Image (spheres, rainbow, N blue to C red):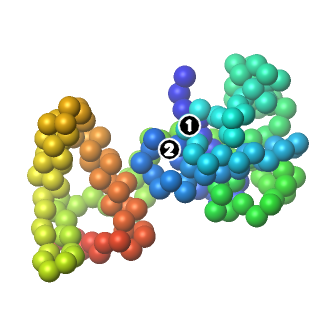
Amino acid sequence: MGMFSWTCAVSGKSLANIHSGMPQEQSKCYLVTPTETIYEDAYDGYGIFGGKDVYELLGNGDRNKGISEHFSGKGKFDIKIVLKENYCGQTYEELPQSEDCEYQGYFYDFEDEEEWETDEIMIKGGEQDMELNEDVLIEYVQSKLLNQGHVVDKEALRLIFDYEMQYMIENGFVEINEIK
């Protein structure tokens, strides 16, 4: 079975699972149902919120029935997810339905976002600036991981670097200048 995720009913931002490499705050959320609000501190991608399975709630204890009814539009309630940063005590009736996340909370494609890719990056800090070729950096990290017994392909590392770079830029940890 694949991973499940939704967009925040308030912000429209994707609910990321804890394995995605996205900022941890993006996996903290509330599932708001007609009868209760359930907090989840670290969403894992499988529809479990605070120990309760949203699909079992939809299917009266039967997960498969709940999945089927949700995806056929016949669930007994609409799934409404609010990221922790956007939750202000909203009730079920006050919220729109959360949309299914096209990335499943994990498979993010930054081509739809701002361009983060460059052939070379400049890292500014301390007493010197350091110019790195992205491919050389990925090969270096891959060799270090292999020496520790971990096998990670280059495209997975590139994706991890893209996520980390976006996070560091958004939070002002580094200044990035594209080299022309």
Identity of the amino acid at label 1?
Answer: Gly
Q: Residues within 10 Å of mark 1 (few under 14, many from 20)?
A: many
Identity of the amino acid at label 2?
Answer: Ile
What's the mark number on residue 45? 1
The secondary element bearing badge 1 is classed as loop
List the single residue furthest toward the bottom. 127
Where's the N terminus, which quadrant? top right
Expressed as whole percent of the image width and height from the top left, the position of residue 13 reads 59, 56
Q: Foreground: 75 or 35?
A: 35
Please, is residue 77 above or below residue 90 in the view? above
Question: Which badge, 1 or 2, is on the more N-terminal residue?
Answer: 2
79 horizontally vs 1: left or right: right
97 horizontally vs 123: left or right: right
Please, is residue 144 above or below residue 88 in the view? above
Question: Is mark 1 in CB contact (under 8 Å) with mark 2?
Answer: yes
Q: Foreground: 99 or 8?
A: 8
Query: Can you identify the residue that label 2 sits on?
Result: 18
67 horizontally vs 170: left or right: right
